[in-house]
């Protein structure tokens, strides 16, 4: 028998110190680079989006790829890309760690729309507020000191 999975992930991480360095005009280039990293790992990208200080990635991950190694590869690869292309002048790296949530495939369309609308969403809510809501929704205990 082959390996079959259906796990839909929402991966979220921010810039170091939540610095607002991911300027809108160059985010598309960053998203394309991350899409390439996912593609090279045989992962399927459904949607990527974000604002100045964080990203959301909706993806399914190939069974041979661990979530931690994928996020590490995304952060390392995208950091190299950002520095090489000089697309975000004040970018100082990504935060340590990440948040990841799993969903039923039935949630895919809502998740895609949610990530597409990050800019409008964050006119009403901070990244910290959003993350706390996600933690509560998924029953994840968290330490406030890591959300600063």
Image (cartoon, helix red, strand yellow):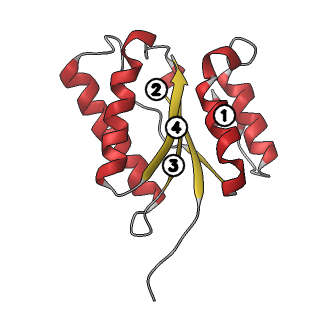
N-terminal label among 2 and 1? 2
Q: Secondary structure at mark 1?
A: helix
Q: Picture coordinates of residue 96 (x, y %)? A: 47, 39
Determine which residue is flagged by label 2. Answer: 16
Direction from residue 25 to residue 134 in the image, left or right: right
N-terminal label among 1 and 3? 3
Q: Secondary structure at mark 2?
A: helix
The residue lying at 40 percent from left, 63 percent from top is 65
Q: Secondary structure at mark 3?
A: strand
Q: Picture coordinates of residue 43 (x, y %)? A: 41, 55
Structural distance between the alpha carbons of marks 1 and 3? 28 Å
Q: Secondary structure at mark 4?
A: strand
Q: Picture coordinates of residue 125 (x, y %)? A: 74, 18
Determine which residue is flagged by label 4. Answer: 47
Structural distance between the alpha carbons of marks 4 and 1? 29 Å
N-terminal label among 4 and 2? 2
Structural distance between the alpha carbons of marks 3 and 4? 7 Å
Q: Nearer the viewer, mark 3 or mark 2?
A: 3
Residue 42 versus residue 72: which sits nearer the camera? 42
Residue 20 versus residue 110: which sits nearer the camera? 110
N-terminal label among 3 and 2? 2
Q: Is residue 102 above or below residue 109?
A: below
Determine which residue is flagged by label 1. Answer: 145
Residue 54 visible in the current orientation:
no
Structural distance between the alpha carbons of marks 3 and 2? 23 Å
């Amino acid at each position: 028998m082959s390996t079959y999975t259906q796990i839909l992930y929402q991966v979220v991480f921010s810039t170091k110190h939540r610095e607002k360095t991911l300027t809108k005009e160059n985010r598309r280039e960053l998203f394309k680079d991350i899409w390439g990293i996912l593609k090279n790992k045989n992962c399927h990208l459904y949607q990527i989006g974000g604002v100045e200080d964080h990203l959301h990635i909706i993806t399914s991950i190939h069974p041979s790829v661990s979530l931690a190694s994928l996020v590490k590869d995304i952060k390392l690869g995208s950091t190299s890309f950002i520095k090489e292309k000089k697309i975000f002048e004040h970018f100082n790296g990504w935060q340590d760690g990440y948040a990841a949530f799993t969903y039923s495939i039935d949630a895919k369309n809502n998740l895609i729309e949610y990530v597409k609308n990050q800019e409008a969403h964050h006119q009403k809510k901070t990244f910290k507020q959003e993350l706390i809501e996600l933690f509560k929704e998924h029953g994840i205990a968290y330490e406030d000191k890591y959300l600063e």
